Image (cartoon, helix red, strand yellow):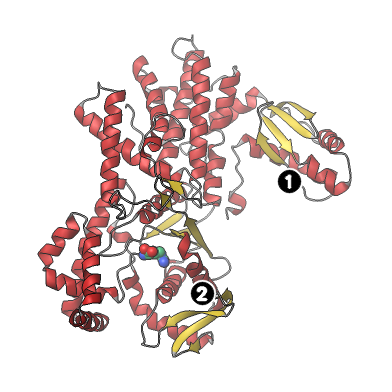
């Protein structure tokens, strides 16, 4: 998806691949792509000779030798290149090259991360809880992943449009409004303000099922809502307003970017629904099935292998979730002018989104140059590997979960640093607790399920937010102890004399590639994996290379490496929506 922007330029491994590509191509007699990886033996290992050997019938080591012969002068970049093993090429970068690259990176405010050329608009559809219903952990996942993607997209220069497609329309609102009337608006507001949305919904549903008179009232109320009855709309607004107030509290606690102006709920597309049907009818893609207006799309069948219709308008005239999503595609393409639309929605909605995409294409509303991508994710599991539930077996209330995270973090911080003042501790505990929950979610491949484990996510060891936050704070404290302003060491070119210094520089220089790679796969966990590696490599440097105790100019040069590491950690965490305190 990143096209010609996706090639990392400040990343030494990609630069190396660019240098080797012509030689590989001429040995292969056809375009051949060297695969360059970081290596323990040297700095980098260039693979690809095996593939070329297979294609040409040559011996892999001979291919590697021929490639080196054709490579030309790479001394500006490499100290040595040699054939190893069955046909790899091991490369040691020259110190001067890495020093130069690192100086360029640290002198740029974007830390060497390239921006897109031109302008491109991306709609990110995320969070999307339902009115008068508790946000569940699935919405937590969507919120946290979507927000990280928005931050990364913004960082490289995309114009992003956040859309919170809340469930705020449809037949359940008949019973919800009638329940609101029974309960009284003050009582309802009270229940919502303490985040007791689930019981409101549940009681409404119970009454709907048990009481025929209530059911009839609910039915009439839906009719009034559809017809735009003013008093009904006012009450509907009360429900939406109280719910979004609650969602906003969760968003502020989580520290995500979503605001009221990002609300683009199902109701927003209501007026467009008749047009959807009309435009489909005109394009000749609408068919009839049992009195309903449907679309048949290639490749979608039910369990009995019969064509599966996408219902656009039911027999009773009502519209569907899919109809709204089709209106939404039209809006995003035609009004917003999006080039990409990313749907951060759980895996169970995969077929729904595939059918919406196929229908939009068939209707001609989704041009080939507009990307519609389902950014899917798995479940959050409890220790028992079943869907995460509270002790009483209820679904976990998000607000309670976040409170518990901060409480637990507060205890951990008190143990680790009793000297912090109460207000400092409260602030750090918030950053750590919330960061831990978000990072635990972001750091596993989103496609997979993960187990929600308090002890693991709050640990100061391993691939966790507290570990990375601590690594960052520790670097800040080096500067504090020496009473040196961090900005004073910027622009200093570090001499990479020690292997650990070189390893640190190489890792720092990957940052650009990692941002782009995370975006290409819409996978924030790639950023997490990298930051964890960076913190680990930094530890190796710090244990082997004295900083404050060494003489000048080495002292300042090493401080510059410390500062660069802290900047990348801070920036990387920020792209994940996680705060990094300077002390903890
Ligand atoms: N409100 C839906 C849910 O809770 C998610 C909406 C996702 N976005 C969309 N355009 N369908 O499952």
Image quarter (top left, top right, bottom left or bottom right) of the C terminus: top left
Task: State which quadrant residue 17 falls in.
Answer: top right
Disc 2 secondary structure class: helix
Q: Quadrant of ligand 1?
A: bottom left
Residue 506 in view: yes
Relative vertical location of residue 183 with respect to residue 226 in this rendering, above or below: above
Crowdedness of circle 2 by 10 Å Cα count: few (<14), some, many (20+)?
some
Residue at image coords 61%, 54%:
3
Pick whichever, 150 or 119, lies toward us. Answer: 150
- Count residues near mark 1 (Cα–Cα under 10 Å), then give few for <14, some for 14-19, many for 20+: many
Q: Is residue 222 above or below residue 256?
A: below
Q: Residue at x 50, y 27 (%)?
A: 536
Q: Picture coordinates of residue 38 (x, y %)?
A: 64, 33
* Label whose residue precedes the other's in the sequence (2 or 1): 1
Residue 544: % across, % down? 53, 15
User: Are the residues at dot 2 and dot 1 in contact (C-beta closer than 8 Å)?
Assistant: no
Say which residue label 1 marks: 33
- Alpha carbon separation for disc pair 2 and 1: 36 Å
Q: Nearer the viewer, residue 214 or 113?
A: 214
Above or below, 242 against 465 in this view is below
Q: Is residue 326 above or below residue 219?
A: above
Would residue 492 be seen by someone viewing this image from the given angle?
A: no
Where disc 1 sits, the SS reads: loop
* Mark 2 CB near ligand 1 (8 Å cut): no
Query: Which quadrant is home to the N terminus?
Result: bottom right
Residue named by callout 2: 360
**In this picture, residue 503 sits left or right of residue 120:** right
């Amino acid at each position: 998806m990143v096209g010609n922007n996706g090639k990392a330029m400040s990343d030494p491994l990609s630069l190396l691949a660019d240098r080797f590509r012509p030689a590989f191509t001429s040995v292969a007699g056809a375009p051949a792509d060297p695969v360059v990886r970081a290596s323990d033996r040297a700095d980098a290992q260039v693979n690809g000779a095996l593939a070329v050997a297979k294609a040409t019938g040559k011996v892999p080591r001979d291919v590697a030798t021929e490639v080196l012969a054709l490579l030309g002068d790479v001394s500006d970049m490499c100290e040595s290149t040699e054939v190893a093993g069955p046909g790899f090429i091991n490369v040691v970068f020259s110190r001067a090259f890495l020093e130069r690259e690192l100086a360029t990176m640290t002198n740029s405010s974007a830390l060497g991360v390239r921006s897109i050329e031109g302008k491109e608009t991306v709609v990110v559809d995320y969070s999307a809880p339902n009115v008068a219903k508790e946000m569940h952990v699935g919405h937590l996942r969507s919120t946290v992943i979507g927000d990280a993607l928005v931050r990364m997209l913004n960082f490289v220069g995309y114009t992003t449009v956040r859309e919170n497609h809340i469930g705020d329309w449809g037949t359940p609102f008949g019973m919800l409004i009638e329940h609101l009337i029974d309960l009284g608006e003050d009582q309802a507001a009270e229940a919502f303000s303490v985040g007791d949305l689930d019981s409101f919904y549940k009681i409404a549903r119970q009454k709907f099922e048990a009481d025929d008179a209530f059911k009839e009232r609910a039915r009439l109320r839906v009719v009034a809502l559809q017809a735009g009855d003013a008093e009904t709309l006012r009450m509907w607004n009360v429900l939406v307003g109280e719910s979004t107030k609650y969602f906003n509290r969760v968003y502020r606690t989580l520290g995500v970017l979503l605001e009221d102006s990002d609300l683009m709920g199902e109701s927003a597309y209501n007026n467009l629904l008749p047009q959807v049907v009309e435009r489909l009818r005109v394009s000749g893609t609408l068919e009839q099935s049992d009195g309903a207006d449907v679309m048949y799309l290639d490749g979608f069948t039910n369990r009995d292998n019969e064509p599966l219709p996408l219902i656009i308008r039911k027999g009773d005239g009502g519209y569907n979730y899919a109809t709204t999503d089709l209106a939404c595609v039209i809006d995003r393409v035609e009004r917003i002018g999006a080039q990409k639309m990313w749907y951060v929605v759980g895996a169970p909605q995969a077929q729904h989104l595939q059918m919406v995409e196929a229908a939009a294409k068939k209707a001609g509303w989704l041009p080939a140059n507009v990307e519609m991508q389902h950014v899917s994710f798995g479940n959050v599991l409890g220790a028992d590997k079943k869907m995460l539930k509270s002790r009483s077996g209820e679904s976990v209330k998000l607000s309670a979960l976040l409170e518990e995270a901060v409480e637990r973090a507060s205890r951990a911080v008190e143990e680790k640093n009793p000297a912090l003042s109460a207000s400092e501790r409260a602030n750090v505990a918030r950053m750590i607790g919330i960061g831990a929950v978000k990072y635990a979610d972001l750091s596993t491949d989103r496609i997979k399920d993960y187990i929600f484990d308090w002890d693991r996510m709050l640990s100061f060891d391993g691939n966790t937010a507290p570990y990375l936050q601590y690594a960052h704070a520790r670097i800040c404290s080096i500067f504090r102890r020496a009473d040196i302003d961090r900005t004073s060491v910027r622009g200093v070119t570090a001499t990479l004399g020690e292997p650990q210094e070189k390893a640190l520089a190489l890792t720092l220089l990957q940052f650009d590639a990692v941002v782009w790679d995370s975006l290409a796969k819409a996978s924030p966990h790639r950023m997490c994996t990298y930051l964890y590696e960076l913190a680990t490599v930094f530890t190796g440097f710090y244990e082997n290379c004295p900083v404050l105790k060494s003489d000048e100019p080495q002292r300042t040069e090493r401080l510059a490496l410390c500062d660069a590491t802290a900047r990348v950690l801070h920036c990387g965490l920020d792209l994940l929506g996680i705060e990094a305190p300077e002390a903890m």
